[in-house]
Amino acid sequence: MFDEDLTVFFNTADFAVVATLADSSTINVIFDRAWLEQLGIVSGTNPVALAMKADADALATNATLTIAGTDYVVVDKNPVDDGATVLLQLRLAGD
């Protein structure tokens, strides 16, 4: 298992943004919604957020995250490479 400190990559002053969970707790994620912004809401858009495994462990499928004032639902959690990070597959809440 990768044991380097990944918090530098999840610093909100650089790459990450704050995601607020339903219980008002927060985690830092690297959020990608570029396709959503460029094409608008169309079939096949798939916003994603990269999170540290320790932060993502508590997230259940169908959990709601609020990122930059927009609500997203966690569709799936996929471990990345060695499992130190998790790619959260998201969809807009209400879709």
Image (cartoon, rainbow, N blue to C red):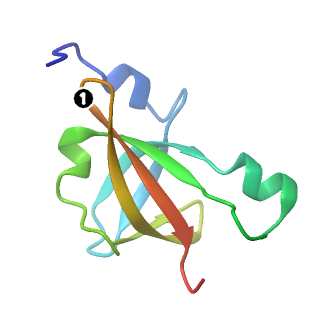
Which corner quadrant holds the C terminus?
A: bottom right
- Image point 33% across, 53% down: which residue? 77
Occupied quadrant, residue 5: top left
Label 1 sits on a secondary structure element that is loop
- Image point 57% across, 86% down: which residue? 94
- Whole-percent x, y for residue 67 in the image: 53, 60
Q: In the image, 52: left or right of 93? A: left
Q: Three-letter amino acid code at disc 1?
A: Ala
Where 14 sits versus 22, above or below? above
Occupied quadrant, residue 21: bottom left
In the displayed image of the protein, which residue is found farthest to the right? 39
- Image point 32% across, 56% down: which residue? 26
Tell which of 8 and 42 is nearer to you. Answer: 42
Which corner quadrant holds the N terminus?
A: top left
Tell which of 52 and 41 is nearer to you. Answer: 41
In the displayed image of the protein, which residue is found farthest to the top? 4
- Image point 66% across, 51% down: which residue? 33
Q: Which residue is mark 1?
A: 84
> How many neighbours does mark 1 have within 10 angstroms: few (below 14), some (14-19), or many (20 or more)?
some
Q: In the image, 80: left or right of 39? A: left
In the displayed image of the protein, which residue is found farthest to the bottom? 94
- Whole-percent x, y for residue 74 in the image: 40, 66
Where 88 sits versus 11, above or below? below
- Whole-percent x, y for residue 2 in the image: 19, 16
Q: In the image, 38: left or right of 86? A: right
